[in-house]
Amino acid sequence: MNDLGLGTQYPIIQAPMNWVTDAKLVAAVSNAGGLGVLGTNAGQREVTPNPKQVEARMTAEIQKTKR
């Protein structure tokens, strides 16, 4: 195992691309042995200036990723 202290099998890190990432991509990268990272607006299609709404959306994506 090629563990770099990140708990990954391969030294591949998927960037947290703001609008491009979502739970499916992050889970796929992580399940393949890399490090998947959610972007701030992961899985979203609409802009919101409300920080609480961003928090709720991000929490939902984190939960989807865990499942």
Image (tube, rainbow, N blue to C red):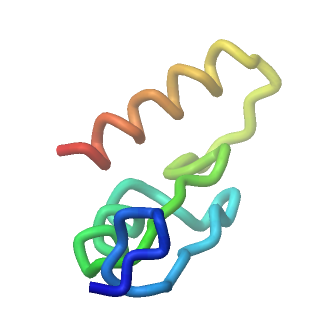
Residue at 54% x, 76% y is 13
The residue under the point 51% across, 21% down is 56
Q: Quadrant of the N terminus?
A: bottom left
Q: Residue 46: which quarter of the image?
A: top right
Residue located at (56% from left, 50% from top): 42
Image position of 9 with respect to 56: above or below: below
Q: Horizontal and vertical percent for residue 12?
A: 49, 84
Which residue is farthest top?
52
- Horizontally, residue 23 falls left or right of residue 37, namely left
Q: How many marks?
A: 0
In the rendered view, tell whether residue 16 sits above or below residue 32: above
Q: Quadrant of residue 10?
A: bottom left
Report the residue that reaches farthest toward the right. 49
Q: Position of residue 15 (x, y in %)?
A: 63, 71
Task: Specify the quadrant that holds the C terminus.
Answer: top left
Q: State left or right for residue 50 relative to residue 28.
A: right
Image spot of residue 6 (x, y percent) = 45, 63
Front position in the image: 56 or 3: 3
Residue 7, horizontal then vertical, whole percent: 36, 64
| Rendered position, 45 above or below 17 | above
Q: Is residue 3 left or right of residue 42?
A: left
- The residue positioned 30% from the left and 78% from the top of the image is 33
